[in-house]
Amino acid sequence: MENTEFRVELVRLVDESYPVVVGRDLEGSVAEFLADKHPDRRAAVITDSNVASLAAEGLLSSFGSRPADLVVFPAGEASKTREVKERVEDELIARGFGRDTVIVALGGGVVTDLAGFVAATFTRGVPYVSLTTTLLGAADAAIGGKTAVDTPAATNLIGAFHQPAAVFIDLDRWLTLSDRQIREGLGETVKHACIADAVFFEALEDAFVERGLSPAEFVRDDALAELTARRNCEIKRDFVTSDVHEGNRRMGLNLGHTIGRALETAAGYTLNHGECVAIGLALQSRLGERLGYCSPSDVARIEALLRAIGLPTKIPEEVPVDRIMEAMAHDKKGKAGAIRFVFQDGVGRLVVHDGGSYARPVAAEDVHAFLQSQV
Ligand SMILES: NC(=O)c1ccc[n+]([C@@H]2O[C@H](COP(=O)([O-])OP(=O)(O)OC[C@H]3O[C@@H](n4cnc5c(N)ncnc54)[C@H](O)[C@@H]3O)[C@@H](O)[C@H]2O)c1
Ligand SMILES: [Zn+2]
């Protein structure tokens, strides 16, 4: 018998555009957005145990007569699992949520990653709105549509691309962050300035190097906080919209992350992500200087800004270089014998290599020798 074969023609052409709103006291704007865009959907606010006590009441009361349920899971990266996702889903089902659900993710990156992934799969997908409450969330997790949970094998291993219906960044939420959390978000912020915006970098230098702002003063400075939230999101937007499913250009966002992520693992997660990115940024600029991409004064500016913010710029003594190399080899971006790096071209621009690639390989032995020279 002859095989039968026919095609299912399915060219997807969807508009997944969404607004990003930055401001203070945004609960009312969220309620208005839901009333306007999703009037017939029942809202489920998903948050973690810390943010629940800090921000859930204000948000729910802004909904007025609109019915909304609150689903809370324990705060922390340890909750970003398939098991917690399942528990959240079971709770939604038990409370009678169905296809007419709109999810409101209220929290930092853990909440928006997990609640966004719940939204991606609940009844095969429902819309969600992100209310990002951390600076790291605003600097990175809010834009891009990547949602995921961790597994024991790797972080963010199981997930989906699911774009939010809207992102709200309420700068008032930053007022309760610890100094260390603010600095962590500023690590990603410096990365964005390094890859795409020399003027933004100068504004950060003015705030932290010249004026010596503390993290607490920074979050109270309306103009600077707004600029930081907006430029982070705009720069990330520019990279991901030209490369939604992670090909070449999105690689640019990995500046400082090749060493940074490996250091995070090698240090046994004693340093947070932003601290490791800061060290990674400082190191890649020094490696870039050796390769002719940065001048000594570029390197000095990058290090001075990171230090003024209060971020580390050196590999901690107790972390052996061999362990960093091992972690880098395990990283999915590593290739046998060579490690791919993104480099900045001075401050505010990336190096684009022949053929248009944003990353270039550096021989593992050269990386090893370089790291050894930095301790
Ligand atoms: N999707 C992406 O593209 C993307 C990008 C970067 C990071 N991430 C993910 O983001 C996560 C890290 O983000 P995070 O640091 O926001 O994590 P988080 O959500 O765990 O927040 C950190 C801690 O701060 C608390 N918190 C949140 N908002 C607060 C507030 N306003 N005041 C006081 N405390 C508050 C939380 O309860 C938590 O204990 C990681 O899981 C990472 O994988 C995702
Ligand atoms: Zn990062």
Image (cartoon, rainbow, N blue to C red):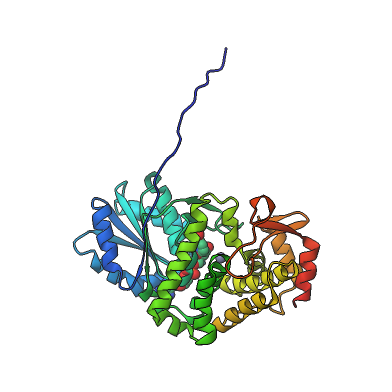
Instruction: Using the rendered image of the protein, determine whether residue 8 is visible from the camera's viewpoint.
Output: yes
Question: At which x and y percent is residue 250?
Answer: 56, 55
Q: Is residue 92 left or right of residue 162?
A: left
Which sits in the foreground, 353 or 82? Answer: 353
Question: How many tags in the picture?
Answer: 0
Which sits in the foreground, 240 or 157? Answer: 240
Residue 330 occupies quadrant: bottom right
Instruction: Using the rendered image of the protein, determine whether residue 78 is visible from the camera's viewpoint.
Output: no
Question: At which x and y percent is residue 40?
Answer: 24, 50
Task: Check the image and report above or below for 123 versus 361.
Answer: above
Which sits in the foreground, 121 or 284? Answer: 284
Q: Is residue 126 left or right of residue 183?
A: left
Task: Check the image and report above or below for 206 versus 261.
Answer: below
Residue 152 occupies quadrant: bottom right
Give the quarter of the figure containing the C terminus: bottom right
Question: At which x and y percent is residue 80?
Answer: 49, 61
Taking the spot 56% from the left edge, 72% from the top edge, the residue there is 274
| Residue sitting at the far top | 1
Q: Is residue 63 left or right of residue 198?
A: left
Taking the spot 78% from the left edge, 73% from the top edge, the residue there is 372
Task: Check the image and report above or below for 216 versus 147.
Answer: below
Residue 259 occupies quadrant: bottom right
Question: At which x and y percent is residue 244?
Answer: 51, 50
Taking the spot 36% from the left edge, 51% from the top edge, the residue there is 127
Which sits in the foreground, 44 or 277? Answer: 277
Give the quarter of the figure containing the N terminus: top right
Which quadrant contains ligand 2?
Answer: bottom right
